[in-house]
Amino acid sequence: MPSFVNPALFWTLGLPTLGVVAIPVLIHLINMMRHRRIEWAAMEFLLLSQKKHRTWIIFKQLLLLLLRMLAVAAVVFLVAQPRLRSQWGNLLGGVHTHHIVLLDDSYSMSDRWADTAAFAEAGKVVEQIGINASREDHPQSLSLLRFSRAALPKSAGKPDVLKQPVGKDFSDELESLLGKLDVSQTAAGPMPALQAIGELLGDGAEEQRIVYLISDFRARQWNEPAELRKELLRLGESGVDVRLIDCVDRTRPNLAIVSLSPAEGIRAAGVPWFMDLSVRNYGHAPVREIAVTLGEDGHGRPPVVLAEIPPGKTATERFLVHFPNAGPHDVTARLPGDAVDADNHRYSTVDLPPDVPVLLVDGGAQARDARYLSFALAPGESVRTGVRPQIETPRFLSLKPLADFHAIDLANVGRLDSSAVTALEKYVSAGGGLAFFLGDRTELKFFNDVLYRDGKGLFPVPLAREEELLVDRLEPAPDVQVERHFIFRVFAAEQNPYLHTVIVQRYFALPPGWQPPTDSTTRVVARLRNGAPLVVEREFGKGRVVAFLSSAAPVWNNWARNPSFVVAMQDLQAYLARRPAEAQSRTVGSPLELSLNPALYQPNPEVRFDYPEQSGKPPVTVNATKSADGNGMYTASLLETDVSGFYESRLTRADGTAETRRYAVNVDPAEGDLTALDGEKLAARLEGVKYRYQQAADFQSTATELAGYDLGEALLYALILLLVGEQILAWSASYHPARRHPLAKGGAA
């Protein structure tokens, strides 16, 4: 007995339509009633002929009638889409039905409304699939793969259920498994899960496959689904029956913390510094007076209030933090509850040093310029800035490692040997910051030929000559005019009048008409009143270079005696200082990877990873191995970071000292955009893909739809053959008079 994909169409429309099958019979009977018995002498010959051919004619008429009846019946069954569940279905190819469930467990599936959630609706659908399969009388199996598992490396991304035979007790086992599953904090999409079908299960030529893609179909993955469409087309072409089950009914508003990070500035123990908090409104209406709860090392502090966040926009608020002791420190932020909870939390950790070392290199014997810089960076014991300046000669650059310094300032240096230039280039390329201050010892040829090197070197601009800035008594104006830049942020919009009193007498001019190449990162951040550049910056590798085209000491200008000099120099070091790796956030699902110098550790050191406390997971211990890229370093990795929070790695150095590294792992805030596509929009983006779309809430009403061999394609071919055969037989059974040929010209009348 076959079942039907559209039983309602069959019983309400199809069954009455089967009466249409009798129409050809009725027409035939009506035509029979029109016959009249008429006496005619010529009919005797015809009656004799009829007796001879009557049986054959009646047979062809009955056969034609039967073909027409079967064609009408085939159309009705095509609409109902029958599936054969008997042994005949097995003989036709439905030997084994494999239900492949791809379950979206990304954190957007925690979308809550009323007394349910998207993931709960998905669980009900999976349960119903198991119940339906367990009621079948032919072989069934089921595989279950979550998106988050498919996104893991192959060694870890195993399905929860892999081709398990479906028995009478299977639905109870499946219900027990689903009770242990929960939505993850990953932003895993459907592509890895779709690709895993072939990798884990093969081509499946010996089985009938039904793939259930159970998801919330957010616009983030499905608005431009070129790769997904290609994968779904491939499944359809291989004979897979694809079902898309939507677990949400509409888009709900949601707020997400998208960033919690240190602002640019000096970060050291005992020094206040700033952090930036950014919150995005994924809703369609503005929100106001949003209070964000903050925590420092597990202790509460006053919240930050965001006045208003327009729809689809991000608002950022800056707040001050202060930790008196050096070492790792944690900062947390939390939003009030809304549709999705995972993106309401954000974590940040910073390893604060006791102070920030800055190297000051002076080309003069008295180190006059460096002393002024040192006083600006560390005025005295009464004022703690967190900067520890160290004054050295140019030879220091060739003899000592530079990686420990957060920034390097070269003041009035004439020339450097090649090893020093190479060391500086490596330092800046790796992310270090470098500042130049010129003066009477500056050698033009060395700077142009070695340091500038046609734009390929460290120095951002070529130099032409020393120039004097003449006094303009007719149109007096400040000598220094700054752009909007981090170094001069205090002086923006003329908030600080001290900068207006700076007098510049001498500077280095650029070649007339020189302009940086269009692809250059060179930028002028301060000019003199005559328009000549005074402060220029550029990027070099991962680092920054800033050049002051006048002196640091009050020789060519009086800036070092101006209070604004102290503020600008401290902001300069903050701008140049490299960002510590600990301040960078990692994303849930991405592995934690340690790179270890073999000179500091025993061979294959043991590393213990601690999960966040709220995860409840025990620590994991791994042995570091040699890096595959051949750089000689040891590497150790934690692959499963499926919970947001603070992670730690613990290991022991070769000298016996313990080493602890702390990491902040956060959810991908983009997954908090709950914009979803309905069935109509999804169909427009998946044009050409053969699939069936259903809402999870409506899946219960289709419980009578049972898997089996789909007769639709066979019926279509049968209908085509029936129609072709009917036309041939109708032509054969009808009367066709012989064609008359006109008489030739001149023929007899």
Image (tube, rainbow, N blue to C red):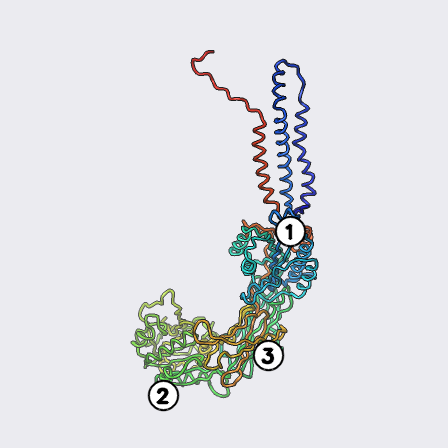
Q: Quadrant of residue 376?
A: bottom left
Secondary structure under badge 2? loop
State the SS at label 1: loop
Q: Residue 723 at what x, y percent from top left? A: 58, 36
Left or right, 418 with respect to 221, comes to: left
* Residue to which mark 3 is pinned: 297
Please provide percent x and percent y for residue 652: 52, 82
Q: Residue furthest front?
A: 52
The x and y percentages for residue 281 are: 58, 64
**Gap between marks 3 and 2 measured at Cα:** 46 Å
Relative horizontal placement of residue 428, taking residue 205 as reference (left or right):
left
Using the image, tell me which numbered label, if any, was put on residue 51.
Answer: none
Crowding around mark 2 (Cα neighbors within 10 Å: few <14, some 14 to 19, many 20+) is few
Dot 3 crowding, Cα within 10 Å, few <14, some 14–19, many 20+: few
- Of residue 576 and residue 467, the one placed in the foreground of this image is 576
Q: Reply above or below: 148 against 382.
A: above
Q: Residue at x 64, y 54 (%)?
A: 139
Q: Nearer the viewer, residue 511 or 435?
A: 435
Q: Which residue is mark 2?
A: 366
Give the labeled residue for mark 1.
Answer: 707
Residue ID at (34%, 78%)? 506
Choose top left, top right, bottom left or bottom right for residue 325.
Answer: bottom right
Q: Are marks 3 and 2 in contact (CB under 8 Å)?
A: no
Measured Cα–Cα span from mark 2 to mark 1: 90 Å
